[in-house]
Image: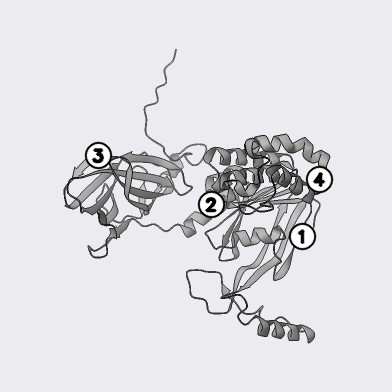
Amino acid sequence: MSNNVVIKVENISKQYQIGQIGTGMISHDIKRWWALMRGQEDPYLKVGTENDRTKKATSDYAWALRDVNFEVKQGEALGVIGKNGAGKSTLLKLMSRVTSPTTGQIKIKGRVASLLEVGTGFHPEMTGRENIYMNGTILGMTRKEINRKFDEIVDFSGVEMYIDTPVKRYSSGMYVRLAFGVAAHLEPEILIVDEVLAVGDAEFQKKCIGKMSDVASHGRTIIFVSHNLLAVQSLCKSAIYMKSGTVADYGPTEKVINNYLSREIQNCVEREWTENEAFGNDKITMLSARIISEKNEEGADVIDVHTSFDVAFEFINHVDEQAINLSLVLYTTSGVCVFNVSTDSLKLGRGRHRSILRVPGKLLNDDIYTITLHFIKDMSVMILSLEDLLTFEVLDVKRGDVGWFGKWIGAVRPSLDFSLDRI
């Protein structure tokens, strides 16, 4: 391992048995032992189904990870992205020594602090103060070093009032605040953080990203798993895209994220249900939703940024004179809310209704967008919510005209008057 490489993952694989723990384990262990005694390969390393939870298993074993290889240099912030079940958390557990690989090896140079899930490394019966000292000791720090960082940790986590309370009485948000404060401030050479930050509020997540950037700027290494692609892009210069337990892509963050989005996000520009199968409840049921371009092209997968389009949907109202607000929320694939458009309260009679929202051209930027639709009663009660109802792509077919940066930045790119006068 070269001097500036602090993590080297070589041919890592992790196999798990499918089904109830203990079923068939003794017989399998005997076969493995007998093969080892004869100097033969483990017979179960050649079997095992791919880690794809959408398919039926064809073996008693599944590969959570298979032949994973990469290196991380000192001071590098590496993002790990992928769908649920792709093997991200298993990879971090192997790197944190929580479990061992079935095959391969991981070489790590330096002190590692991990934040894998709420409660990792904390004893529930001990107070916040005691857990700070215990975690610091585990990381190899002296009491004097911990004392020097103690006030900073407590201030960052915002739990000063409860620092002498057993952490089992903390909320999940308080727990993760203190856990991250400990992991980030006790000066590990390598900081490993899983999606656990999603437990905190937006302000705390912003503080965490800022702290991790500060940690990386001081020559320490960050491994960051998140579904928040904006956070990954802002923090990490390189990324790994995991798919079904393997590395599908590895390289510059923007390239890896674009590859992930193009392969995992499927456009869905039209949905329709029969009245018997309609999605909903005894108050509202959905019949259809679709994207229609200004050229009356229903089901167009890609919308030109210069072209306006309609979001049309039909539903059935089952309650007489029901006061309803319709709320349509548009998100980018990285989770940014572009806009939330709501109607005034509408008194709707029973029966079928149709609604159309016109989105003007020259508003949205190149991206893939998802639409969520809410039906709200009396401005306060959610009647029906349809998340990710439609997914569509907006593309600039004249990208060559966008200027020196090659691509417009931001979620929107409206056409506005920009005056310039000589004075």
Is there CB contact under 8 Å for labels 4 and 1? no
User: Under tag 1, what secondary structure?
Assistant: strand
Q: Nearer the viewer, mark 3 or mark 1?
A: 3
Q: From mark 3 to mark 2, how far is it between C-alphas?
A: 35 Å
* Residue 23 shows in this picture: yes
Q: Which residue is mark 1?
A: 107
**Mark found first going from the N terminus, 4 or 1:** 1
From the viewer's perspective, is 309 left or right of 369? left
- For the N terminus, give its image quadrant: bottom right
**Up-down relation of residue 42 to residue 361 (above or below):** below
Q: What x and y, as percent, mark residue 101?
A: 70, 67
User: Under tag 2, what secondary structure?
Assistant: loop
Q: Which mark is residue 58?
A: none
Instruction: Tell me which residue sits at (75%, 86%) in the image.
Output: 34
Q: Nearer the viewer, mark 4 or mark 2?
A: 4
Q: Which residue is mark 4?
A: 141
Q: From mark 2 to mark 1, how far is it between C-alphas?
A: 26 Å
User: Under tag 4, what secondary structure?
Assistant: loop
Q: Nearer the viewer, mark 4 or mark 1?
A: 4
- For the C terminus, give its image quadrant: top left
Q: Which mark is residue 227?
A: 2
Query: How many marks can you see?
Result: 4
Q: What x and y, as percent, mark residue 22?
A: 63, 78
Instruction: Tell me which residue sits at (48%, 75%) in the image.
Output: 56
Instruction: Tell me which residue sits at (76%, 48%) in the image.
Output: 134
Q: Which residue is mark 3?
A: 345
From the viewer's perspective, is 327 left or right of 263? left
Of the residues shown, which amino acid type is indicated by label 3?
Answer: Ser
Q: From mark 3 to mark 4, how far is it between C-alphas?
A: 60 Å
Of the residues shown, which amino acid type is indicated by label 4?
Answer: Met
* Residue 307 shows in this picture: no
Of the residues shown, which amino acid type is indicated by label 1?
Answer: Lys
